[in-house]
Image: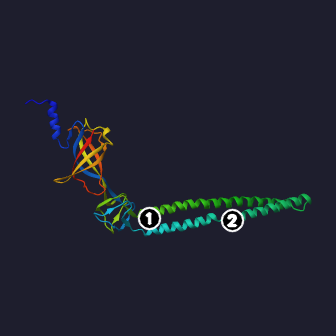
Amino acid sequence: MNLSAKTVFLLILLFLPGSSIVSATTLETEGVLTLFEEIHVPARDAGVLSDIPVRAGTHVTTDTLLAKQEDTEAQVTRDQAITDLFNAKRLAKNDLKVRLARKAHEVTVAELKRATEAAERFSKSVSQSEIDRLQLATEQTDLQVYQERFDLKTAQLAVDTHNAALRLAEHRLKNRTIYAPTSGVVVEVLKHAGEWVEPGEAVVRVVRMDRLRVEGFLSAQQASAKLIGQSAKVSIKIQQDETVEVTGEVTFVSPEIHPVNGMVRVRVEIDNRESEFRPGLQATIKIER
């Protein structure tokens, strides 16, 4: 029996690992469930771990407490920042020196005016040196008003500085507590209470289980970016004789073609809110064209 080159190629493609089956209306390929998201949750500050209330298998939601670091020094720094901010606000509201400087200036202006008028009315009643002295005093008190205003403005600006210092202290204190960044399941606790950790060092590994991916392969001729967003039927083999079908969505079509078999990786996402499925299960993807 003579077979055409095209027929031989299709037969080879069919039996290659991850190969796809194509009908007139449906694209079909075998795949496997994989994790949608896996996070190695890190420490954000250096220090000793004081508590890790979770363990492998613990279900967590966003902002669930995963671990705590010793935070006495961070608390003291935060408390000091609160005190400094309170004092800065108190000084920023105290304009007593400005008012006193204004009053002193008003007095010197009035004295200079009286002396000048007296000298004009009664010759030599007020010496020129006295007028010069009063003139200098007037200028000094005017400058004092300016200085006190400047100092008050500086005190008011210091409130912003102390506000920033308090936010930084609170941020550093918060960094001593490690929270879950997403909902999922703790699958590994990598550190223990009493151990020292550095910033960026993983403490807990969390996997997201409410959504999974199914990855398979299609021929390059059929797998185009137009598939992204299309609905897909995913048949998941729960047990040897039990299969469950769910609906998913094509979210990724690789721009790369495998140089050996000419296949393209395709990814479908499915909901798994009840944690019915687990990564590693075999599945069949069917995409209606």
Q: Quadrant of residue 250?
A: top left
**Circle nearer the N terminus (2, 1):** 2
Q: Is residue 23 above or below residue 63?
A: above
Residue 186 lies, with reference to residue 216, above or below; the image says below
Label 1, secondary structure: give it: helix
Q: Point out residue 120 in the picture as x, y percentages from the top left corner.
A: 90, 57
Q: Which mark is residue 97?
A: 2
Left or right: 141, with 11 as reference point: right
Residue neighbourhood size for the residue with mark 2, other residues' Cα within 10 Å, grouped as few (<14), some (14–19), many (≥20): some
Counting other residues with Cα less than 10 Å from the Cα at mark 1, is it few (<14), some (14-19), or many (20 or more)?
many
| Front residue (pair 102, 138) | 102
> Which residue is depicted at the point 79% across and 60% down?
109
Picture residue at 22% right of the left edge, 43% below the top: 29
| Mark 2 residue element | helix
Q: Which residue is mark 1?
A: 173
The answer to whether residue 86 shows anywhere in this view is yes
Q: Which mark is residue 74?
A: none
Disc 2/disc 1 C-alpha distance (Å): 38 Å
Q: Is residue 133 among the parts visible in the rendering?
A: no
At which x and y percent is residue 233?
26, 46
Task: Work out which residue is located at the far right of the displayed protein and give it.
Answer: 122
User: In the depicted view, which residue is nearer to us: 51 or 100?
Assistant: 51
Percent across and percent down for residue 258 are 23, 39
- Report the amino acid beneath label 2: Lys
Task: Give the position of the C terminus as an image quadrant.
Answer: top left
* Residue 157 position in % (x across, y down): 59, 59
Image side of residue 252 versus residue 4, left or right: right
The one nearer the camera, 136 or 147, is 147
Front position in the image: 28 or 181: 28
